[in-house]
Image (spheres, grey):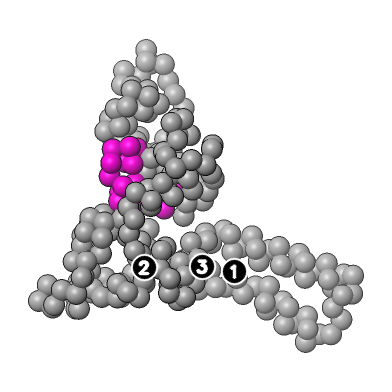
Amino acid sequence: MKNTSTIPKTLPITGASRKPLSENKELSFDELYLKKDYKGAAQYLLKNKQQFDSGIFHYNLGTVYSKMGDQATARFHLEKAIQEGYINSSSLNNLNFVKSNLQVDDLSTSSSLPDQFVNITTSIPVAGYVSFTLLLLIIFTLMIRFQKITKKWVMAAVLILAVVPMLFSFIYVKDVNHAIALQDIPLYEGPSKIFSEKGKVRAGSKIILGEFKEGWFYVEFPLSLAGWINKDQLGLF
């Protein structure tokens, strides 16, 4: 898939078997997409979700919503697809296209070092951390075998460093609550509308949520959007 600035014109990979029209009276996802019936394609995906791998389902739905002009919902599904492990040039290209259309100041665009650190470390799937840890352990084993490391305290230190990425992913990353604002949402100083409104989280913004109180989340990151937000109109992943 070419890395262009537009949603690819080629058909998204569906991952679902296609049946002839004689066996299936309704049009397939591919046929609806080619006819540019994007609303029908979205309905088909939602109705037949179980036929698709989770990552491919969210990729297809994100692509369709982008075609329909709903970039905030498109971003939610594309971010979800990547989180589910569907990472390739198509999903990354489509996500970049959607983000360029949204042009929001959020976690992924913040210049704050804490925001950048959190965005990078939480964007890597847990499987990525596990793979990296296994690679470090293989290197560690080879270094011992070829006697590149002989002192026990050095062995212990290197072993601890090797497993840090996996521990970090299981202790922190897997429990992080990401969200995409599906529309402009008011930001309050406390978990209720009785508190003063301090701004808005713009539609399509990526945020990380913390404490939850009676239908309200505290926005932890980006730091510029710290405050309380109602859970309605949030796409959690």
**What's the amino acid at mark 2?**
Ile
Name the residue at 77% across, 66% down.
Answer: 139
Q: Residues within 10 Å of mark 1 (few under 14, many from 20)?
A: many
Residue 102 lies, with reference to residue 223, above or below; the image says above
Q: Between residues 104 and 121, which one lies in front from this camera angle?
A: 104
Precedes in sequence: disc 2 or disc 3: 3
Q: Is residue 152 visible?
A: yes
Name the residue at 48% across, 34% down.
Answer: 13
Q: Nearer the viewer, mark 1 or mark 3?
A: 3
Q: Nearer the viewer, mark 1 or mark 2?
A: 2
Q: Which residues are magenta?
A: 64-81
**Which residue is under mark 3?**
121
**Which residue is under mark 1?**
166
Number of numbered discs? 3
Question: From mark 1 to mark 3, how far is it between C-alphas?
Answer: 12 Å
Q: Residues within 10 Å of mark 2 (few under 14, many from 20)?
A: many
Residue 216: x percent and y percent? 22, 70
Residue 12: x percent and y percent? 45, 34
Label number found at residue 208: 2
Residue 195: x percent and y percent? 13, 78
Name the residue at 18% across, 66% down.
Answer: 186
Precedes in sequence: disc 1 or disc 3: 3
**What's the amino acid at mark 3?**
Thr
